[in-house]
Amino acid sequence: MAANLTEGAALGSVCNLLVAAVLEVTQKVATFKFSLDRLKTTLNSIKPIFDDIERLNEILNRPEEETESFLTQLRKAEKLVRKCLEIKSWNFYKKYTYSRKLNALDQSLLRFFKLDAQLHMVRDSRRIMVGMRGMDDKVDEILSFLSHRFPGWCDVPGFPEFVVGLDAPLEELKLMLLKDGVSVLVLSAPGGCGKTTLAKMLCHDPQIRDRFRDNIFFVNVARTPNLMLIVQKIFRSKNKHQVPEFQSDEDAINQFESLLKRLKPHPSLLVLDDVWRGSEFLIERFRISQPGFKVLVTSRSVFRSFETTFRLKLLNDENAKTLFCHSAFKDGIPDVQNDLVDKVVKGCGGFPLALKVIGQSLRGEPEAKWIHRTQKWSEGVSVFNPHCDVLNCLKSSLDALTEIPELPDLKECYLDLGSFPEDQRIPATALLDVWVELYNLDEEDVHTLVHLLELSDRNLINLVLQSEDGHFAMQHDLLRDLVVYQNALDPIEQRTRMIVEINENSFPDWWTKGDQPSLHPRLLSITTDELFASKWHDLRQPEAEVLVLNFQTRIYALPHFMERMSNLKVLIVTNYGFHQAELKDFDLIGHVLNLKRIRLERVSIPCIGIPMLQLKNLRKISLVMCDIEKAFENCSFRAPSIWPNLVEMNIDYCSDLIAFPVGLCNLASLEKLSITYCQELIALPQEIGNLTKLKALRLYSCTKLSSLPGSIGGLKKLKYLDLSDCLELAHLPDEIGKLEALGTIHMKGCGELRGLPPSVRDLGQLEKVICDEEVSYFWRSHAECLKKMNITVIRREANLNWLHRFDP
């Protein structure tokens, strides 16, 4: 056996012995191979830094005091690794325990090095001669490793797997960007040409990554940009820097310039994606005199004031046909007449977006449908400028949505996407709230989600599964332009949905003039910017059934005309600003008696008053990233008559939720309760057992929740229980066996679980258990009693992308 780590050993030697121990145990005990391989990767990555520290200490004749903390960490690690040799093959519990300990050790080493070693290295490097500056490269090497282990550190988005015709433009763009003297480069092309895709490819190019390392910032720019918000996003992307408060645009730029200096020795690249004409000032403000700092701008426009511009051309015929066939046919091989393919490709004009969308809409269609579609295009007269041809093509795909008999409302559903701001992720649950009420879709029916899948299959949206949060839809800005245009085709008095955007406090003329037109939309969407003063003009909207309010200010007042919207069924209020918002006139909600669904996101909710508590038609409420500490203080919550028809409550990312309010356990009709990513939640009250109609309980990633109350056994109708990533959950109550209807339980990531109570054998209806391999051993020991049980073992790499789920 290799020698143990000694007290007097040098840092590099200690690390070598630990690596040797890992290799020895890996060869002898197969059970821990996965965990030990990860640990070995971590050690191999940080070992060069240890060697450098040891060498510098010798050169500078410095004591080992500063590295003693490392030595202590590594000695403990060696003892843990060698204990794995002592575990018997039949002892599943110890195997599980030590597997978790090894994973925790790996994470601990990563955190320890990131937070501590970097500081020592930087300090030491300042004390030595210029010739020893190579240590900085080692630090960057490790930070680069960490950034790949934890993708949340890097905000550069990925790009599609299948890309055609951009290899040559990429090389040309790269040469222009890296050219000496070029500080700002504008990448210009019409909408739907692939500008953003090319910019993403550039950021992932090895030569660019080697030049800028992790100092690449990719920012989507709003049509009315907010410079301070952009700089705040940049600071947020560098996790090791706190996000400061800015007093002005000038202050923001000054602090950004200071940040660039701290990120040396490697230069930085800022990508401003989708900058509109009229926003040239933004580019000018980021024109900072810093060695190596460069700005790449993508825009539909050419900005004459910036001398270096790369104009992305449309795809040539060959590449256009290749991309189209990839979208339209299985394996990219045409199964209709070639001349029809050529006509469609020609009609798309070389626009990648149009080729993908049109190709997908014709996939699997008979040849007669192709002929009909090409005839319609030849007859169409476009009113779009300057990109009229591509939007005319896309409009045909929109019209094709009416030709799906099993989804008769699909086109209307798609047009509703225009209710949400551009360049923002749209939660699928918010869309379903709208669609269920407007089109009488069945929320429990899988066909409701099929609407989103169909739109995704036709390339009209990008459907993203973000961690365990559910689905999010994203829409290309050109497609959103089409939706907004389509919604505005009818005279204002005949529109079924009104989409209003207010910049500063400039309301549309039709809204402010005395003889306001008679409006009859079923959906009203109002988007305001960060300068909106919440001073509302009156609006008569008696027939609106859905109200979507999108805003960015720190203080936002609900519109006073809302209380007269007697038909209103759905209210969606979303703060897209950087800071949590205070919601004024909250009591207005209590006057909208027909409300069925409320969704509030990133707002501070005041104490909910009696009028709102008496909304008898309310069926669903969703609180996302809200401050809810004061919301449930009202003693009226203890009354049995509150929200008598509420069947679903969702509380997500509410960091001030420490204990579930006892009063909410009086929701007699509640069937679904979802509490996710509330990482300060430590307990559920005993009164939770009063929710006797509850069918689904989701407690996903409530990391401090250590136990469940015994009263949970009173939930006789509970069919679905999700305890995934409840990291502190050590045991289940004995009363768990009383859940006679339980069919599914999720327990992935329950690392502290010490076993299962014997009563789980009484779960006669249990069919699905989804868990880690370690927890599966506990369940398998009861397999003889649980005849219907099927265990699915989940193994997944750590991924912190969800931390950026709500980046504004």
Image (spheres, grey):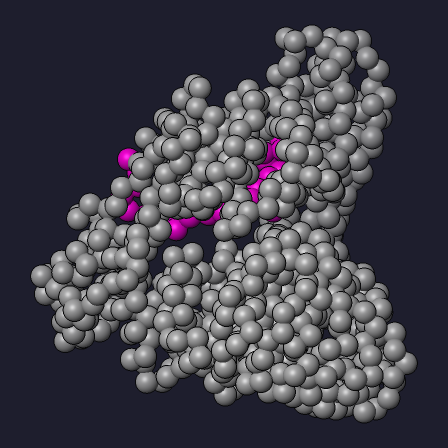
Q: Name which residue lies at 42% across and 31% down.
A: 305
In-front residue for pair 31/772: 772
Where residue 192 appears, x then y in whole percent?
34, 52
Q: Quadrant of the N terminus?
A: top right
Q: Name which residue lies at 65% across and 9% down.
A: 130
Taking 297 as reference, is 623 left or right? Answer: right
Residue 153 on the magenta span: yes
Residue 800 on the magenta span: no
In-front residue for pair 690/156: 156
Q: Compared to 145, does 333 lie above or below? A: below
Where residue 159 appears, x then y in whole percent?
42, 48
Q: Quadrant of residue 461?
A: bottom left
Q: Compared to 10, does 462 lie above or below? A: below
Taking 426 as reference, is 777 left or right? Answer: right
In-front residue for pair 700/437: 437
Magenta range: 142-168
Question: Does residue 210 appear in this view?
Answer: no
Q: Name which residue lies at 56% across and 56% down.
A: 503
Where residue 668 appears, x then y in whole percent?
77, 90
Q: Compared to 807, does 540 lie above or below? A: below
Q: Residue furthest right?
A: 635
Q: Name which residue lies at 56% across and 33% down.
A: 285
